[in-house]
Amino acid sequence: MKARLLAVGRFKSGAEGALFAQYNARLRPPLDLVELPDATGSPAELRRREGASILAALPANALLVALDLGGAAPSSEALAALTSRWEEAARPLCFAIGGAEGLDETVTRRAEHRLSLGPLTWPHLLVRALLAEQLFRAQCIRTNHPYHRAWRP
Ligand SMILES: C[S@@+](CC[C@H](N)C(=O)[O-])C[C@H]1O[C@@H](n2cnc3c(N)ncnc32)[C@H](O)[C@@H]1O
């Protein structure tokens, strides 16, 4: 499943970048990371500007999945099923991660799916690695790879 990750902010040299690279390298194919600059202004202006750059970076007919605390939080198995559906749609798949102030409403409204990684707020640079790990896990679930050890009674 070829997918693009539109993410506000830049990896500086550091642990988050290495962690993302480690999981992303396991994905077949890896996510195509597009880093978008942090905007300036009031929190509302900043969200609006960052939202505009996310929307501008979407290819035509993109199927957009927004990483959003207020979205649905599927199990890893349910996420694996969702990734099959997204693949079957045969549209350019894009994930979007907001910056420190979160995603603008223009982005969450445009998204066809709002994906939550649970009710905890994670730092946006770490969310990239969490998403890559869960997409890798989803691939393993779909191919019965033993990386995912489902709980059994
Ligand atoms: C530091 S968070 C922004 C917090 C902001 N107050 C909000 O409510 O969105 C930065 C970005 O990371 C992503 N993010 C953080 N925690 C998340 C979670 N539990 N589930 C999904 N996405 C999350 C979202 O894309 C969010 O816009």
Image (cartoon, helix red, strand yellow):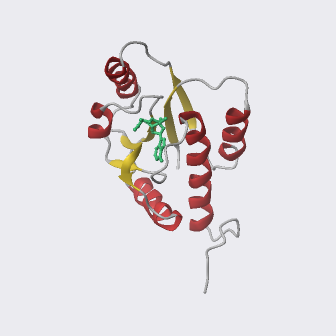
For the point 52% across and 50% down, which residue is it?
Answer: 1
- In depth, the one of 34 and 153 nearer the eye is 153
Residue closest to the eye, 36 or 81: 36
Answer left or right for 136 relative to 83. Answer: right
Q: Which residue is drawn at 32% across and 42% down?
A: 111
Residue 53, percent from left and from top: 39, 22
Q: Where is residue 121 drawn, in percent x and y? A: 49, 43
Above or below — where is 82 with respect to 36?
A: below
Q: Quadrant of residue 60?
A: top left
> In this view of the protein, which residue sits in the foreground, 102 or 36?
102
Give the quadrant of residue 61.
top left
Image quarter for ligand 1 equals: top left
Extreme residue toward the bottom, this view: 153
Residue at 39%, 22% in the rendered image: 50
In the rendered image, the vertical position of residue 147 relative to residue 113, given as above or below: below
Indicate the position of residue 45 as horizontal and vertical percent values: 32, 17
Q: Name which residue lies at 55% across and 47% down.
A: 131
Quadrant assignment for the C terminus: bottom right
